[in-house]
Image: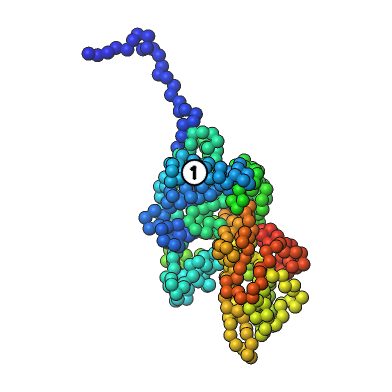
Amino acid sequence: MTRQLPESWRDQAPPDLKPHPDAPTIHVRSYRVITPLFGGGVDPQQADPLTTVRSSEVRGQLRFWWRATRAGRYGADGLKQMKEAEDCLWGSTKGQSLVQVEVRLASPGIEIRSYNDRGRVRYLGDPTSPLSYAAFPLRRTDERPVPGGLRFGVSFDLVVTLPGAPELKADVLAAMRAWETFGGIGARTRRGFGALHCYRVQGAADVGPWLPPTNRAEAVKSWLKDELPTFVLPGLGPEGVPLLSSLGKLQVGDNAAVNDFAAGDRQRNIPAFEPKLLQLFADSGTGAAISDDVVIPLVVWYYAIDRLKEFRQRRYQSTSRHDPQGKFGRSRWPEPDEIRWRASGFRGRHDTPAPATRTRANKFPRAVFGLPIVFQFKDGIGQRDSEEIDPPNTTLQGADHDRLASRLILRPLACVDGRFASVALVLEAPALPEGGLKLVGDTSGVLIDTTDLTTTEAAFTPLGGKTDVLQVFLDTL
């Protein structure tokens, strides 16, 4: 039997269906990985063989940046409350996450492990590699004669389900914004590996991409200072939790060579390391697959890495008529001399510090860049004229924990105009481990002084009397 609609219903329009304001929001974010992807798989230093970018990895990154942007809500004594809120939003062994994350890989990119250098096989971590300073964990060892590699040109889509509650949604968007601006995927993201460029968002409004309009240094710096307070909560978080502060240390590289290269003008002011990077791709047999989308942000990124190398490895240099380029001598930093004091009391050819007026401070200022640090000496323990020469290679680490993550973040940032800016940021976190520092194998019995440098102790190049080591580095960009 056929049923007829009541006469009164026939001319009525169907109800206007609208989603509930607190309903979850699903959208898709498209990313390019604009710097090499380091590791990120189940095996150390290897990309995952099946899923180059894993959703669990993305979720872990978002949890970190949620803490970095939201810890100020909970105060110095709010660790328990912050942990409960984190588990509620991002999930735990007792409950499911309110945020669903799915990775759809667009391109796994290409992997480079080695390259040909004048007929010899070189790996990316080798001292002669143009990436050696940043990729030093990929150096060959007796235990790992064939190290891992890096992946270039990775891209993927991320399907994200945002919770409907306005405060929770704002929390997730803050974490995503910080992750896209300062974070990445894989290992060593604080040194710029796995940096992201979100170039498209589908299915939602007012959720990015969040990009500065141009790569001019002052414009990018001003944009960041204006934007940070919009997604970073003020206040102190629980002790030891790294914070992204809207008032913290921030610098944007203003190097003409990098800007000219990023603008496509490759006929002038080419960075000295750029030809070596291009040669690396050519010698790997992958030059045809490397486009400007890969090369340009790579050069902008490595500009900051190169400046960090020059700053941390500043040495005395002697020149002569026969050797105008000069030879590098002893470090200008005080740590190697302090280790010599402890090992031998400066016996042998290093019987006085250089310069002779340097004050022995019993401090290791470069520890603020992260731990551990391996100090390598040219000769090692040996005998010359019946006296000790140099100590063996020595490791500086935390007294209670050997590692301390660096507070310094270096990475390229994509801009709306298609160019890239070199960005450096310092997270708010303890500068040194709570338990202090120690030298592995040190038998002197002298505790390392972890107080701040004085202006007298900092009276050496490159600090020049300035006591804030990280700020002095930022000023070199």
Residue that lies at the very extreme toward the front in this rendered image? 445
- The answer to which quarter of the image holds residue 452 is bottom right
Q: Residue at x 63, y 70 (%)?
A: 313
Q: Is residue 463 visible?
A: yes
Q: Residue at x 59, y 56 (%)?
A: 409
- The answer to which quarter of the image holds residue 309 is bottom right
Three-letter amino acid code of the residue under disc 1: Asp
Q: In which quarter of the image is the N terminus?
A: top left
Residue that lies at the very extreme toward the left in this rendered image? 1
Q: Measured from the top left, where is residue 190 in percent x and y?
A: 56, 57
Residue nearest the observer in this picture, 311 or 356: 356
Q: Crowding at label 1, few (<14), some or many (≥20) Cα neighbours within 10 Å?
A: some
Q: Measured from the top left, where is residue 347 in percent x and y?
A: 67, 83
Q: Which residue is drawn at 49% across and 34% down?
A: 164
Q: In which quarter of the image is the C terminus?
A: bottom right
Colouring rule applied to residues = rainbow
Which residue is the site of mark 1? 87
Q: Can residue 272 be seen in this view?
A: no
Residue nearest the observer in this picture, 266 or 172: 172
**Helix, strand or loop under label 1:** helix
Q: Residue at x 52, y 72 (%)?
A: 128
Left or right? Give the position of 383 relative to 100: right
Residue nearest the observer in this picture, 449 or 363: 449
